[in-house]
Amino acid sequence: MAQNLIFSKRILLWYQKYRTQDLPWQLNKTMYKTWLSEIMLQQTQVKTVIFYYERFIARFPTIIQLAEAGLDEVLFLWSGLGYYARARNLHKTARIIVQDYCGNFPKDFNVLISFPGIGRSTAGAILSLTLDQRHPILDGNIKRILTRYYAVDYYLLGNKSKINNKLWLLSEQLLPDTGTGVFNQAMMDLGRLICTNTCPVCKDCPLQENCQAFLTHRVNQYPRKEPSKRLLKKTIWFLLLLLQRHKVKMIWLEKRLYQTIWGGLFCFPEFSSFNMLNVWLLNYNLNNDQYIDLSILRHKLSNVDLEIRPVLLSINKKINCKQDGIWYDLTDPPIIGLPRPISMILQRL
């Protein structure tokens, strides 16, 4: 117990002395802003999130405006941030809160974790950082601090849930009785600025005196890396149907199914082989001898090394494609979500 108090005190003293400038979502803090930032920060670095957050909050300053918007516009503003299920869940939850709670964020932990996309750590962050309720957080930064400080062999035992439970217990025990929000923010900042994933600045860390990883010269061994999975190499073909009418250029885009990569975003017709692309063209009575091969594009997903081969075909009239899609006007682009590779190809055109 005494050790926990020492830990917490050192964290808070460090934060008081070295606190950095507030991030955009920490100014005039609300539950809505904290929730939005926490969802964006999942799997994404702060420096990347700032731009997306500021653009998003400028368009949707309140949860009511977010709920009233169409999903296409939400995905448009999220385009490039990745992990698009986050945006879809954000939109779903906004509509639930507006419809069932009159647009007021519930202040009950158990209610929050029942919403799409809000787990234990996100709910804890919303309630502690905004309302100072006593809830622990276990984001990547805090998890890294705890695994180093206590030398927890995260992947060694092969039981991730068991280790997670241990880290949740430690996180709970270290919480001070008051000022929980400040403590949680201090822990996240320490992980982001000092106890970083690579090249941690141990000399500036307030915890180094009792950090087991530091004392045994094994800081870079924690948290133990999950055995790296081999990236699956995959080649796909995109068909760019270009229609030009009176100086207006249009490209056919199809809305992707939600259960696929880039779910809910718009994309060129995709094929797993060039033969399948040719069959598609024949089905629509299109001349498959007039296409142009564009530059190959490479794109890495979390577990796939993607080789994209765009094929451009100019046509002189619209075709009635069976898929849900639109003719995308290159001179007056509609507000829809686009995966990064699609945006890059469209910019080239």
Image (tube, rainbow, N blue to C red):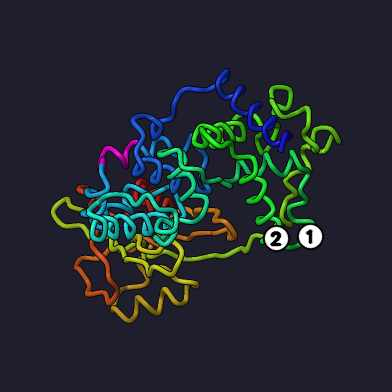
Cβ atoms at labels 1 and 2 below 8 Å apart: yes
The answer to if 21 sits in the magenta stretch is no
Give the mark toward the camera: 1 or 2: 2
Residue type marked 2: Lys
Q: Give the residue furthest to the top.
A: 17
Q: Which mark is residue 199?
A: none
Residue 28 against residue 143 in the figure, above or below: above
Residue type marked 1: Leu
For mark 1, does the 10 Å Cα neighbourhood hold few (<14), some (14 to 19), or many (20 or more) residues? few
Residue 190 against residue 229 in the figure, above or below: above
Marks 1 and 2, Cα distance to the nearest angstrom? 9 Å
Per the image, label 2 sits on a secondary structure element best described as: helix
Per the image, label 1 sits on a secondary structure element best described as: loop
Q: Quadrant of the N terminus?
A: top right
Q: Which mark is residue 157?
A: 1
Judge left or right: residue 64 versus residue 132. left
Residue underneath mark 2? 162
Mark 1 or mark 2, earlier in chain = 1
Q: Residue at x 36, y 43 (%)?
A: 31
157 or 293: nearer the eye? 157
Q: Position of residue 336 (x, y in %)?
A: 28, 54
Q: Position of residue 349 (x, y in %)?
A: 33, 49
Q: Which residues are magenta?
A: 54-61
- Residue 8 sits in quarter: top right
Q: Position of residue 211 (x, y in %)?
A: 77, 34
Q: Is residue 293 visible?
A: no
Judge left or right: residue 128 versus residue 171. left
Q: Is residue 44 visible?
A: yes
Q: Position of residue 147 (x, y in %)?
A: 72, 44
Q: How many marks?
A: 2
Q: Residue at x 34, y 52 (%)?
A: 106
